[in-house]
Amino acid sequence: MTSSLRSLDHIKSPVTAELDRFAGFFKQAMRSNVKLVDTVARYIVKQKGKRIRPILVFLAAKTCGGVSESTYRGATLVEILHTATLVHDDVVDDAETRRGLASINAVWKNKIAVLMGDYLLSTGLMVALRHDDFFFLKATSDAVRRMAEGEMLQIQKSKDLDIDEETYLKIISNKTASLLSTCTEIGAASITDDAGIRSAMKEFGQNLGMAFQIRDDMLDLTSRSSILGKPVGGDIKEKKMTLPLIHALKAAPAKEAKAVVRLIKKGAEKKEIAEIVAFIERYDGLTYSANRAREFAEQARLCLVRFPESDAKQSLLDFVEFVVRRDK
């Protein structure tokens, strides 16, 4: 990261006080009278992530004029639902760690992890229902539906490795951008009933999410495992078709592209993954992907033109830059 790139700590500075208060909301919402549920919930609270989604909710709300009690509920709702999807993802992926700690399924096995994910989903929905936040409920329910559809589409297409760029963009729109757009839309909705403002913030989050996932897929091929926290080329090993690979396969001669697809299908090992990464670089897969991420980033910036200047708006703009230039 260059010195001109704002850190996440700097980006969230306009909402530091709100995030501190949010931590209490989140912890309280996770509590249960059932001892096992409460034990697992407290373990999850210890697995502190970057809190990107609550940060977006609060920054969007402040950009639209301020923060209300409704904003805290919205931030709590999206973070609980996000956490639920991570718990379920770890079961699906048979993951052993999450945020530097053993995953729920690794500690309590799959049955408890699935049930805990279900508990979190219902808890998040109850946060909205308890205060008649029906717009929040509609937005987050749609996001969870899209996330599941995106995951299923990726599984369906990955079997034959026949994902083109259009399908890839649809997958990441559903899997990643849907929840980020919900965060910014909910932030706006917690402050205003203006449909135009809500729509602009939703579109901002959508474009931000697209840029975020493309950059994430690039980092899978370029970051040292010690930085990213997972093996380089993990997507290739898992036979996931991402934009850098999709573009390289399209740009390369058919014979060479088919040979790479065969390597991936049979299960590429470390040396072969390095060869595939070199193939992607040779046919400009990373350069092309970086340009596409920048295009989505520019669309995100344009969504904020209508909003008055403020520290929160500047942080959203800095967030866009952080997303396309981050190295981990």
Image (cartoon, helix red, strand yellow):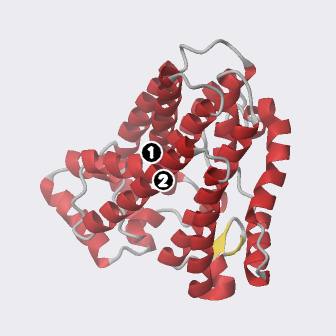
Residue at point 60%, 30% (across, down): 188
Pinpoint residue 152: horizontal percent, then vertical percent: 34, 65
- Report the side of 57 relative to 43 (left or right): left
Distance from Cα at disc 1 to Cα at disc 2: 24 Å
Against 30, residue 193 (above or below) is above
Most foreground residue, 98 or 104 = 104
Tag 2: Cα neighbours inside 10 Å, few (<14), some, or many (≥20)?
some
Tag 1: Cα neighbours inside 10 Å, few (<14), some, or many (≥20)?
many
Disc 2 element:
helix
Q: Quadrant of residue 35?
A: bottom right
Q: Circle 2 sits on which residue?
A: 141
Please state, as top left, top right, bottom left or bottom right, where the N terminus lies in the image. Answer: top right
Q: Quadrant of residue 180?
A: top right
Against 317, residue 154 (above or below) is below
Q: Circle 1 sits on which residue?
A: 214
Is there CB contact under 8 Å for labels 1 and 2? Answer: no
- Report the side of 256 relative to 80 (left or right): left
